[in-house]
Image (cartoon, grey):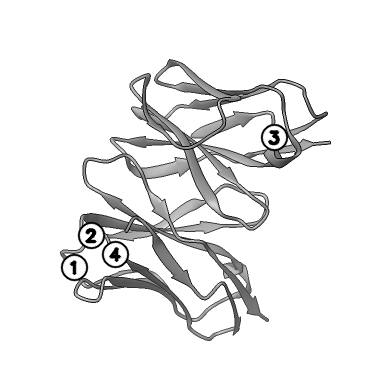
Amino acid sequence: QQQVKQSPQSLIVQKGGISIINCAYENTAFDYFPWYQQFPGKGPALLIAIRPDVSEKKEGRFTISFNKSAKQFSLHIMDSQPGDSATYFCAAQSSGTYKYIFGTGTRLKVLA
Amino acid sequence: DTAVSQTPKYLVTQMGNDKSIKCEQNLGHDTMYWYKQDSKKFLKIMFSYNNKELIINETVPNRFSPKSPDKAHLNLHINSLELGDSAVYFCASSWRGVWQFFGPGTRLTVL
């Protein structure tokens, strides 16, 4: 019940296309869902995060869609660019806990 | 002005040795973490300290011992290094567990 399942494991998208990464969880106590972006040789960096009181959050080309009833959330990268090529991690957390449960990561490659 | 810094960035050592990794954060956060990232990129939490108190201690061999001398520092000492300890170790910090900032990582290679 503590797992966060992330898919796909890897993704190849053409420049200008939409990249979509999905995550699913079981624990209904989770109430904070961040996404992290990690470039090779670097630490993960917070990209965007959402709480379940909203169904969508957008920051620039990055959008989180959240479906509370389905216990799923996804990251959409619009107009994907080669510079977006990185590994993306979703995560989930329950309020009052200090622990993130990370997904297994998605390696995104955007072709020029 | 790095928010979360780690030293060293690379560590190459022989099996059986003891080594330490140091982490410092200048964000004023109250919580610090150690994560291990293996070759498949899985991020696994190892330990967390809140205000110098150990609050997360995952199933980690007792050869790994964290120490937090103050809220801004968290060190990781590893005894009797094994081949399977080879990984990238990340330090992170947060305010009350939310919005974790990660350091640049320490790549440990055990020969």
Q: CA distance from mark 2 to mark 1?
A: 6 Å
- The residue that label 3 is drawn on is B9
Q: CA distance from mark 3 to mark 4?
A: 36 Å
Camera-nearest label, 3 or 4: 4
Q: Mark 1 is on which residue type?
A: Val
User: How many neighbours does mark 3 have within 10 angstroms: few (below 14), some (14-19), or many (20 or more)?
Assistant: some
Q: Secondary structure at mark 1?
A: loop
Total labels: the figure holds 4
Q: Quadrant of residue B36?
A: top right
Q: Percent position (x, y) of residue A108? A: 59, 72
Q: Are marks 2 and 1 in contact (CB under 8 Å)?
A: yes
User: Residue at 71% of width from left, 20% of height from top?
Assistant: B18
Pointer 4 or 2: first along the chain: 4
CB under 8 Å between callouts 3 and 4? no
Q: Amino acid at mark 3?
A: Lys
Q: Which residue is mark 2?
A: A51
Chain letter of the residue beneath label 3 in the structure image: B
Q: Residue at position x 71%, y 23% from top? A: B80
Q: Read off the chain for label 2.
A: A
Q: Which mark is residue A54?
A: 1
Mark 1 to mark 4 CA distance (whole Å): 19 Å
Same chain letter for marks 4 and 2: yes
Q: Is residue A5 left or right of residue A87?
A: left
User: Disc number at residue B89?
Assistant: none
